[in-house]
Image (cartoon, grey):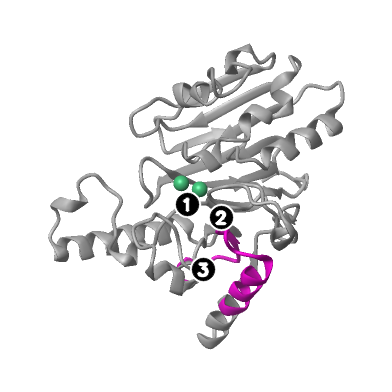
Amino acid sequence: MSTEPASAARLKLWGVRGSIPVPGPATVRYGGNTSCVEVRADGEIIVLDAGSGIRLLGIALEQEFGSRPINLTLLITHAHWDHIQGLPFFLPSYNDKNKVRIFGYNGADTGLREILKGQMATPFFPVKLYDLPSKIDIKKLDTMEFNVGKVQVRAKPMNHPGICVGYRLFTSSGSVAYLPDTEPYDAFKLHSSKSHLLSPEQTRKRAEKERAALVEFLHETDVLLLDTQYTDEEYQEHVGWGHGSLSSAVRLALDAQVRKLLLFHHDPNHSDTTIDAMVENARKIIANGGQRLEVEAAREGAEFALN
Ligand SMILES: [Zn+2]
Ligand SMILES: [Zn+2]
């Protein structure tokens, strides 16, 4: 064990919204940008997803580093638009002093590189991905465990249409789990190409098994950013859409003995007051069960230390 205290890992939220950016007076407190989270740990800059929030992160990084090179790793959960749409506007990509490593898995039918190139191809964008001056290295992951420097990363497929993973980062001062898009398994709705072949009993058993594996994946996470796109009432109208509900998210975090839960991937139709009410409800569920779990809603610009 090192005698030198490592500086605490920290995370900053640059985009917390799901589906589409929603600026305006109703979202001014929690923010309207789509998914992007920055983790600084063990000398690494790790960015989780490239939603529209990554534009602001890029500006902040260029201001911080000035003429010094920026070397960062971007982990993509999946290629739905709200998780990649900010990449063409990421300022560090436009400067040849910088190195941007992008890791992720292939989309349903297309490779990661083709997907990211595709959204910048003519006629969608005036600059092609590989015309950007920075050193961009896109790597398709073929393993569920890997390292970014000294940070150990584990990935896990999520219950979401197409190919989508969640990441857990183990740093020297605690762990962060980032699961922006996933539907509860207890709805018995499995997003798998073969799920229609299962009997109701097989489906129930499979859902139980998948949920238990997810609880294990998240066990004793320090900070969990989890899909809570819907209230419980809204979820009933959106079963099968691939997103989470408030009480299922709280139950999952409790079962996994998570320390802090951040409600994440807010629905574009949710105002700040709706999100406030969801936080209150989450705290009631926890208090009623006599359990302990810190919970708050992810807010654009918020920063957390991991120790
Ligand atoms: Zn999403
Ligand atoms: Zn998605």
Q: Amino acid at mark 3?
A: Gln
Q: Is residue 279 magenta?
A: yes
Ligand 1 within 8 Å, label 2 CB: yes
Q: Amino acid at mark 2?
A: His
Residue 156 in the image: above or below residue 59: below
Instruction: Tell me, for residue 257, which label it has, or none.
Output: 3
**First-in-chain label (3 vs 2):** 3
Report which residue position mark 2 lands on. 265
x, y percentage for residue 89?
68, 30
**Residues under labels 3 and 2: Cα distance?**
21 Å
Q: On the picture, is 247 further left or further right than 172? A: left
SS type, badge 3: loop
> Is the residue under label 2 in contact with that under label 1 (CB below 8 Å)?
yes
x, y percentage for residue 213?
36, 57
Report which residue position mark 1 lands on. 181
Residue 2 seen by the camera: yes
Ligand 2 within 8 Å, label 1 CB: yes
x, y percentage for residue 159?
37, 52
Q: Is residue 298 magenta?
A: no
Q: Amino acid at mark 1?
A: Asp
- Mark nearest the camera among 3 and 1 is 1
